[in-house]
Image (cartoon, rainbow, N blue to C red):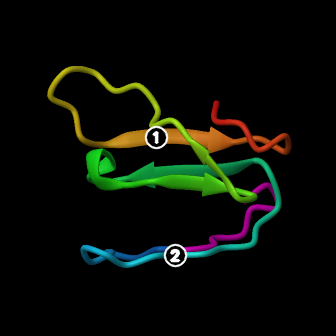
Amino acid sequence: DGSGRAVLYDLGKAGSERTITAQAPVSVTLGDARRVAIVVNGRTLPAPPRAPGETLARFSIGADGNLR
């Protein structure tokens, strides 16, 4: 997160849900981003763009709750 603290390292299973509390900006790396819903402060955000055939997604979430 924005304070330099590692918040979550995990391999999720289908149907699982993770909730975190962190200081913005939050850096995120998702291994199979096609199968992930991103919800920030109760708002579902669109998946970040990826190159064709790429499943890995890297992005950050700003203090305003938007993806960057």
Identify the residue under disc 1.
58
Q: Which quarter of the rendering shows the N terminus?
A: bottom right
Identify the residue under disc 2.
18
Q: Does 40 appear above or below 63?
A: below
Q: Which residue sits at x=61%, y=49%?
A: 27
* Residue 41 in picture, x, y percent from top left: 75, 58
Residue kind at label 2, given as amino acid type: Arg
Which SS type dominates the magenta stretch? Answer: loop
Q: Which residue sits at x=34%, y=27%?
A: 50
How many circles with numbers are drawn on the protein?
2
Q: Which residues are magenta?
A: 1-8
Mark 1: give few (<14), some (14-19) or many (20+) Cα within 10 Å.
Answer: some
* Residue 68 in picture, x, y percent from top left: 64, 30
Residue kind at label 1, given as amino acid type: Arg
- Tell me if label 2 and label 1 are in contact, CB under 8 Å: no
Task: Say what secondary structure mark 2 lies in.
Answer: loop
* Residue 51 in picture, x, y percent from top left: 27, 21
Task: Say what secondary structure mark 1 lies in.
Answer: strand
Q: Does 36 appear above or below 22?
A: above
- Of the pair 41 and 53, the residue shown nearer to us: 41
Give the number of the mark in front: 2 or 1.
2
Q: Quadrant of residue 54?
A: top left
Numbered circle sitting on residue 6: none
Q: Does 52 appear above or below 17?
A: above
